[in-house]
Amino acid sequence: MDFKTLYTSTEGRINRKTWWLGVIGMIIVSFVVALVLSLPAAFATGGQMGPFTQGLLNLVLTGLFFVPFRALTLKRLHDRDRPENLFWVFLAPTVVSSLLMMVGLTGSMQETEFFGQTTTMYQANLLGNAIGVVSFGVGIWSLIELGVLRGVEGSNAHGPDPLDPLGA
């Protein structure tokens, strides 16, 4: 598997197995990057990162992984013969949620009783919960669309069927 092409090229088609392997690789790398980026922020804030810092961290991670996420998504959409604009539908909830969190419209930090101790935690408000529900729905839809449903059989405008190596 050519990882450079998998994570940078938007040409052609990939099957579900290749998509899952690419996504799992991205999850592992993004977890490590998120940990490395969040540690300095957590130390600087005494472990109490506010909504602005959390939203900013989400946007930074989204930006860092934009190219590989786009490449994997578009190639799966090509395999499913679906419009490329669905990529933006799948990405929008993350960006909107992060931006609204940064400006404080989706919730706030509140003192909460947690396992017998009082701690300050982020509490989503009605808008934050609504965006969470929409994000969850779009996430399930994208997971089914990209990771569960089979691509179209045979060749299409984006190339041969990745499950038919002979192109028959």
Image (cartoon, rainbow, N blue to C red):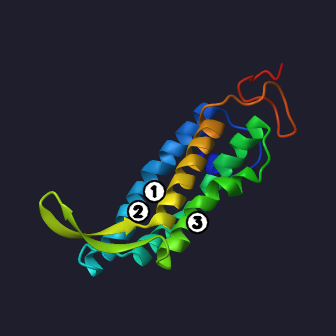
Residue linked to disc 3: 95
Q: What SS does tag 3 mark?
A: helix
Q: Nearer the N terminus, badge 2 or badge 3?
A: 2
Query: Callout 3, which amino acid?
Result: Val
Q: Position of residue 115 (x, y in %)?
A: 15, 57
Q: Position of residue 103 (x, y in %)?
A: 50, 80
Query: Callout 1, which amino acid?
Result: Ser
Q: Nearer the N terminus, badge 3 or badge 1?
A: 1
Residue linked to disc 1: 30
Tell which of 3 and 124 is nearer to you.
Answer: 124
Q: Are marks 2 and 1 in contact (CB under 8 Å)?
A: yes
Number of the label disc, if any, that sits on residue 34: 2
Asked whether, in this view, residue 116 is left or right of residue 33, the answer is left
The outermost residue toward the right is 157
**Quarter that holds the N terminus:** top right
Q: What SS does tag 2 mark?
A: helix
Q: Position of residue 145 (x, y in %)?
A: 66, 38
Q: Residues within 10 Å of mark 1 (few under 14, many from 20)?
A: some
